[in-house]
Amino acid sequence: MSTPLLQASGLTKAFRHKTGLFARPTTQLAVNSIGFELAVRERIGVVGESGSGKSTLGRLLLGLTEPTQGDVWFEGINHKQRRARDWKEFRVRTSLVQQNPLSALNPQMTIGQQVAEGLLVHRIAGRAGAYEHVAAMLERVGLSSAMMTRYPHQMSGGQRQRVVIARALVLDPKLVVFDEAVSALDVSVQAQVVALLRSLWQELDLAYVFITHDLRIVRHLVDRIAVMYLGRVVETGDIRSVYEWPRHPYTRALLASVPTMDSTVRNIEPPIKGELDASKISQGCSFWSRCPFAIDRCAIETPELRPIPAHGASQHAACHRAEEFPRSIAPQIDMVTERGTASQKEMAL
Ligand SMILES: Nc1ncnc2c1ncn2[C@@H]1O[C@H](COP(=O)(O)OP(=O)(O)OP(=O)(O)O)[C@@H](O)[C@H]1O
């Protein structure tokens, strides 16, 4: 077997919180013992509610946050063993695209200067070479090279996000982490950017970690999915299996909550109770207090992420009752595309 591009084991990040002047600080596990593997050219979606730990996981994978425990390897090298020169190389081979393109861009620099910056800093190209490289990259993401002289405020939100993507790809990385990269865009612009990311993936030698709370976006963009709840991965598997037959009640509830254009689809999944609350983690399953299917065992025994025997080796769920749930409840997830509305069948991967 070839070495995975990216790997993590026992990855944990604890944050200390203090709620008042005299309150005792509490520890919150934003990421809790996560194992992770991503092959070259593979795309994984990391989904979950706000506060489930997705961004912290992304930052840990990119070495932007120090883990409290656990390890991350990129191309076989452990982050803990990287020296300054290795980190520099790692920064060329990986990129992060975040939610708000306006805050990601410097208002006082032209688009050309910002996309070229990495090439010049890492001495990958001289000024003349950088100019040509940037022009080609802008065209690759659907912008005219004439936009090089513009400033961010002279562009639309969708154009700015294309600039951020061009900047992330200009150094020819192997891994790009997208953190809610299209969530803030209008739905029609979102569809265009998703189509762009699909075509960039087909043409370039890229792996994606796609972090989002929006299950409609990720459905058409990734090969595998990891569902996070309060710092843990509670379900993972190839995208088709998980969408067709989710085995964790939390995944089922997330999928059932996605609005669909198909009026014949009835949501028969019982709703989950309450809100995500880190203080509720104690013994047992972290989801049990909200779970409509909880039994006594769930309050006592923490379920491990384990393979689901009847459904292929690639699907894992952390639920004592995983085998009991029937096939999917919300089979058609629509997505607005550039040409109108399409169901998942029309947008086959
Ligand atoms: N720097 C920090 N200091 C203290 N707590 C933090 C820090 N970063 C994240 N957290 C906490 O860790 C938990 C997970 O946050 P994280 O941002 O990773 O979740 P998320 O799933 O990405 O949510 P969102 O989509 O809202 O960003 C949250 O409860 C958050 O308050």
Image (cartoon, rainbow, N blue to C red):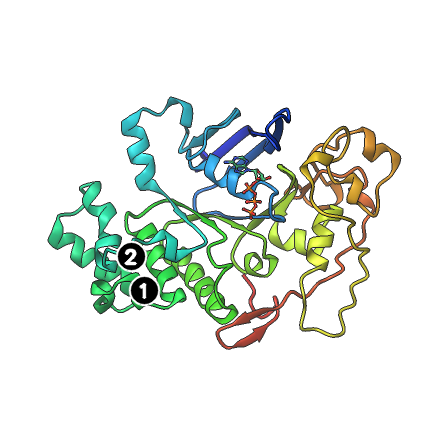
Residue shown at the point (61%, 42%) measured from the top left:
52
At 75% from the left and 57% from the top, the residue drawn is 328
Please tell me which residue lies in front, 165 or 343.
Answer: 165
Vertical placement of residue 336 versus 137, above or below: below
Ligand 1 image-quadrant field: top right
Side of 150 where 338 appears, left or right: right
Q: Which mark is residue 182?
A: none
The percent position of residue 295, horizontal first and vertical second, equals 87, 38
Asked whether the beta carbons under mark 2 and mark 1 sit within 8 Å of each other, the answer is yes
Q: Is residue 172 left or right of residue 234?
A: left
Q: Which residue is mark 1?
A: 153
**Residue 123 in the image, given as x and y percentages of width and height:** 18, 41
Whole-percent x, y for residue 53 in the image: 58, 40
Quadrant, the C terminus: bottom right
Q: With respect to residue 296, does 100 lie above or below?
A: below
Nearer-N-terminus badge (2/1)? 2
Q: Three-letter amino acid code at disc 1?
A: His
Q: Can residue 1 be seen in the rendering of this structure?
A: no
- Determine the residue positioned at 52% across, 25% down: 68
Q: Is residue 323 left or right of residue 121?
A: right
Residue most extreme to the right: 296
Element at label 2: loop
Q: Residue at x 13, y 48 (%)?
A: 126
Q: Which residue is mark 2?
A: 107
